[in-house]
Amino acid sequence: MDLRNVEIFCGIADTGNLTETARRLNATAMTVSRRLAQLESELGVRLFQRTTRAVSLTSEGEEFLPYARMMLETEETARSLFSSETQGASGLLRVTAASEFGKRHLLPLLPALMEANPALKVDLNLTDSLVDIIGQGYDMALRLAPLKDSTLIAHKLADNPRLLCAAPGYLARHGQPACLSDLPLHRLLKISAVAQWMFEQNGQVVNCPVTAHFSCSSVEGVRAMCVAGVGIAQLTLLDVRDELRRGELVEITLSDVGRHPLAVWALLPTRQYIPWRTTVLLNALKRALQDVI
């Protein structure tokens, strides 16, 4: 299979346009169209639906796309083995992560990582929406919940339980709740999309409806109000790790329920071939998160 044809296929999948793909690859639109036709003939399927304005992947094209990207990545890695100019990881690393986690724990790693790997490029998408990492060509997704889609490969990076916390000043003024039934007596701060807080009791999940005195769409907003002494919040350990270490927040433990267990997961599209650039980031994340308190 001609990898130039595969490269053109991936380019069209990314742009949705033959002319734009030709421009990016420094080729003519006629050459791009001819090479796509060669690939479709070789595979015996139609990879794109074509209209006068755009092209879109057929179901066969969507199925072939992750394998096509894998072929190009494998070729790139093989070439780099014998390149005197290549040091460390190279190529484009595409990552998607939850916004707050990405800002706090991923972005700070990237300057040193890219300095140590000069040929590495990074495309980072910070979003709280679920992303189709196979269809959109991502190397890795970082999520804060267990894997549900069994077609993706999950690597656990760190435990990240939900916990209760408050500022020392708030607890000095209002006292500390001792059990779950004490929470309604306090000022509670929550993320807007969260209807109830979750705890663990004897290995089972306990849901606690929350009437909040303050709610915010972002973790950052809830954390800031909590540090300011406005009330009690339930956030994940990584959301407040630094504040706990500095003494700006204190963890609250209840007698009848415990932390709700969660973890940080790195999701990969396949285990058959993992580019070195993905492995480099995985290792950096594991090192950064291994000292979670």
Image (spheres, rainbow, N blue to C red):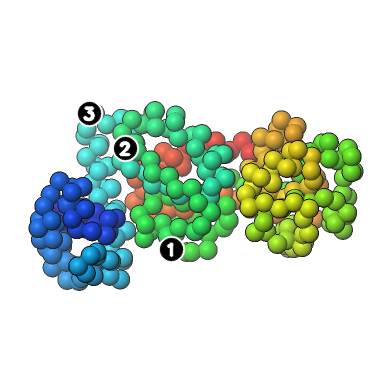
Crowd band around label 2 with a 10 angstrom C-alpha radius: few (<14), some (14–19), many (20+): many
Q: Amino acid at mark 2?
A: Ser
Tell me the CA gap for discs 3 and 2: 13 Å
Quadrant of res 119: top left
Q: In terms of depth relative to the viewer, which is nearer, 240 or 140?
A: 240
Question: Mark 2 against mark 1, which lies toward the viewer?
Answer: 2
Q: Residue furthest front?
A: 53
Q: Amino acid at mark 1?
A: Thr
Mark sitting on residue 90:
2
Q: Earlier in the sequence, mark 3 or mark 2?
A: 3
Q: Amino acid at mark 3?
A: Ser
**Quadrant assignment for the N terminus:** bottom left
Q: In terms of depth relative to the viewer, which is nearer, 252 or 102?
A: 102
Q: Where does label 3 land, which residue?
A: 84
Mark sitting on residue 151:
1
Q: Are marks 3 and 2 in contact (CB under 8 Å)?
A: no
Tell me the CA gap for discs 1 and 3: 37 Å
Above or below 243: residue 65: below
* Residue 161 pos. (x, y %): 67, 49
